[in-house]
Image (cartoon, rainbow, N blue to C red):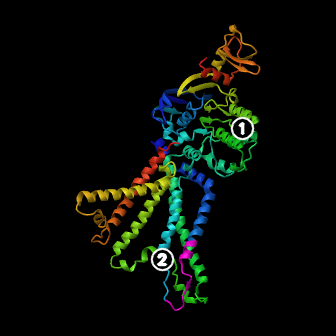
């Protein structure tokens, strides 16, 4: 569980990134953290992971203050960063070195994800492609069974089959005790798996809603033409006509996360 | 209470951290050991005399010469100690280090154990082996300048190496009547080396980038500041004299035979680690990405 109260953070005092920022996320969710470039997504993840110290306010993750970097907190929190590097060792050696540091690590789960992702434990990590290394890191992260999993742009560099495998594996492996926070610009890669959307802009939360509530309130469609009586909240041109966001009628539609995000940014919702 | 101590230090977690480091970096450490072995051997081999002019008096390579060579080789050890916290050289590796499930104390201690204690112990072993090996190789090929092989007396030209004779038995002639001063200087040399090692050990924790360059620059600035302060005092207290007259008298020998600079440096060397070790630990604790 994440509980952020009145958080303030800045790199330069004159341009604060977060000012009186508050957020609460409960376990058992896969949360999509969205925002434009420079909105503060990666900084927020860094603050949650204890990599950066807040200037003011409180952050609590599973009862711990992240920046204290209590080893029990670190053993129950795993972050997959956007930029990463590995030592020049085999996958098997890496797993042997790191897995004992995570008490809930499940080697069987790791092997089954390896099979799905077609990862060979004998491969040297530095001889793999960026995508393969990312798949390994995702596999390792999920196998730690940490209560808090943070992914920063997890699908960047993954090929199309791997993206769908990632979604499948993530959904099947996450339990109700875990909280998964995914920050990404590749919204289409995660729109079927998240169950909460948080959008931040200029250091504030401008949208925070469960996907169930979104689909109950809004409807995402593609239409050839726009009519005045359509009650369209937001529309975008597309090759087939228009992608529109409308108030939900009786039928529920899937979420078009990209359209939702653009509508939120355009302040149409 | 138990929970608190566990979050500060857990022996099990600490051994896992050490195991992690050794599993990931054993090749680097083996290379460092091999490099140190070759370098120490080369320095010893170059420093040992291998040919003599027949009939001319010879200078014996003994504990004093070993000590001098040891002093040169110790720079290699200091360089190794300075490579601690190697993960702080880039953002992704810093991330990996900070996210490792261990306390700041365990992380600091593991680096100190590997780079400080184990590094020093292995260095002493390497130097001992190299000193014997270099002596054996040099003695095997010892010749006069005319090409004639030196006989059995060659074993006297290079004495057998031992740490005991180098550090404890040997007292240079100039110190024979002041053994206390000699021992003081020896002990202070060790403390100074330890102090320099502690400083280098903490460089990467304290500075985000270019730690060694920044250290060298700050050292130059410090020397300059001392000079400026001395000149300032000269003008203030001895306005009728030239500042050089004062600075020339800065270093003076006390009645006990030590110079004031030596006492000042000894004081700094003793105090510095007491400050630097907690400083490094708290810097590590507060380290940000």
Residue at the (37%, 73%) spot, across then down: B182
Q: Residue furthest top?
A: A229
Residue at the (55%, 32%) spot, across then down: A40
Residue B225 visible to an observer of this rendering: yes
Quarter holding the N terminus of chain B is top left
Local crowd size for mark 1, using a 10 Å CA cut-off: few (<14), some (14–19), many (≥20): some
What are the residue bounds of the magenta stretch? B41-56
In this rendered view, identify the residue nearer to me: A43 or B15: A43
Residue at the (34%, 72%) spot, across then down: B181
Residue designated by label 2: B65
Q: What secondary structure is found at the residue carrying circle 1?
A: loop
Question: Is B287 on the left-hand or right-hand side of A151?
Answer: left
In this rendered view, identify the residue nearer to me: A156 or B34: A156
Q: What secondary structure is found at the residue carrying circle 2?
A: helix
Local crowd size for mark 2, using a 10 Å CA cut-off: few (<14), some (14–19), many (≥20): some
Q: Position of residue A167 (x, y in %)?
A: 71, 32
Dividing the picture into quarters, in which one does residue B244 lie?
bottom left
Residue B131 visible to an observer of this rendering: no
Question: Is B216 on the left-hand or right-hand side of B248?
Answer: right
As measured in the structure, the alpha-carbon distance from the residue carrying label 2 to the one carrying label 1 is 62 Å
Chain for numbered disc 1: A
Which disc number belongs to residue A158?
1
- Residue B54: in magenta span: yes
Dividing the picture into quarters, in which one does residue A206 lie?
top right
Chain for numbered disc 2: B
Dividing the picture into quarters, in which one does residue B122 lie?
bottom right
In this rendered view, identify the residue nearer to me: B154 or B116: B154
């Amino acid at each position: 569980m994440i509980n952020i109260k009145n958080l303030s953070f800045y790199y330069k005092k004159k341009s604060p990134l977060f000012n009186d920022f508050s957020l609460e996320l409960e376990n058992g969710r896969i949360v999509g953290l969205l925002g434009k470039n420079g909105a503060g997504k990666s900084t927020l993840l860094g603050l949650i992971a204890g990599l950066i110290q807040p200037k003011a306010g409180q952050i609590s993750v599973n009862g711990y203050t992240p920046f204290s970097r209590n080893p029990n907190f670190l053993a129950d929190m795993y972050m997959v960063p956007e930029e990463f590097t590995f030592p020049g060792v085999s996958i098997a050696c890496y797993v042997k070195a790191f897995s004992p540091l995570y008490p809930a690590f499940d080697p069987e789960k790791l092997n089954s994800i390896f099979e799905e992702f077609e990862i060979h434990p004998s491969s040297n990590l530095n001889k793999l492609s960026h995508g393969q290394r990312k798949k390994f890191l995702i596999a390792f992260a999920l196998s730690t069974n940490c209560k808090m999993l943070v992914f920063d742009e997890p699908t960047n560099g993954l090929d199309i089959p791997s993206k769908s495998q990632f979604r499948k594996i993530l959904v099947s492996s996450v339990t109700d005790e875990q909280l998964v926070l995914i920050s990404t610009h590749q919204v289409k890669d995660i729109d079927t798996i998240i169950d909460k959307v948080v959008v931040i802009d200029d250091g504030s939360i401008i949208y925070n809603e469960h996907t169930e509530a979104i689909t109950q309130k809004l409807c995402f469609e593609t239409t050839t033409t726009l009519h005045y009586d359509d009650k369209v909240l937001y529309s975008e041109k597309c090759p087939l006509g228009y992608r529109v966001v409308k108030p939900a009628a009786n039928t529920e539609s899937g979420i078009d996360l990209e359209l939702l995000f653009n509508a939120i940014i355009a302040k149409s919702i | 209470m138990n929970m608190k101590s566990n979050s500060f230090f857990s022996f099990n977690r600490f051994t896992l951290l050490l195991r992690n480091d050794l599993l990931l970096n054993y090749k680097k450490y083996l290379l460092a050991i091999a490099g140190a072995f070759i370098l120490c051997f080369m320095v010893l081999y170059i420093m040992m005399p291998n040919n003599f002019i027949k009939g001319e008096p010879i200078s014996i390579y003994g504990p004093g010469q070993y000590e001098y060579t040891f002093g040169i080789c110790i720079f290699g050890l200091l360089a190794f100690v300075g490579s601690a916290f190697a993960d702080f050289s880039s953002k992704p590796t810093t991330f990996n280090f900070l996210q490792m499930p261990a306390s700041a104390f365990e992380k600091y201690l593991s680096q100190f154990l590997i780079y400080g204690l184990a590094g020093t112990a292995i260095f002493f072993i390497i130097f001992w082996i190299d000193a014997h090996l270099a002596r054996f190789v040099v003695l095997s090929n010892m010749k006069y300048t005319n090409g004639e092989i030196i006989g059995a007396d060659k074993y006297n030209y290079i004495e057998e190496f031992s740490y005991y004779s180098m550090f404890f038995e040997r007292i240079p002639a100039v110190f024979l009547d002041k053994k206390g001063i000699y021992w003081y200087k020896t002990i202070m040399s060790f403390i100074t080396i330890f102090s320099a090692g502690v400083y280098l050990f903490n460089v990467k924790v304290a500075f985000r980038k270019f730690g060694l360059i920044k250290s060298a620059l700050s050292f130059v600035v410090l020397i300059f500041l001392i000079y400026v302060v001395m000149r300032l005092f000269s003008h203030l207290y001895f306005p009728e004299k030239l500042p050089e007259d004062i600075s020339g008298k800065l270093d003076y020998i006390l009645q006990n035979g030590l110079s004031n600079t030596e006492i000042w440096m000894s004081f700094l060397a003793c105090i510095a680690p007491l400050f630097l070790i907690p400083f490094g630990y708290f810097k590590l604790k507060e380290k940000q990405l």
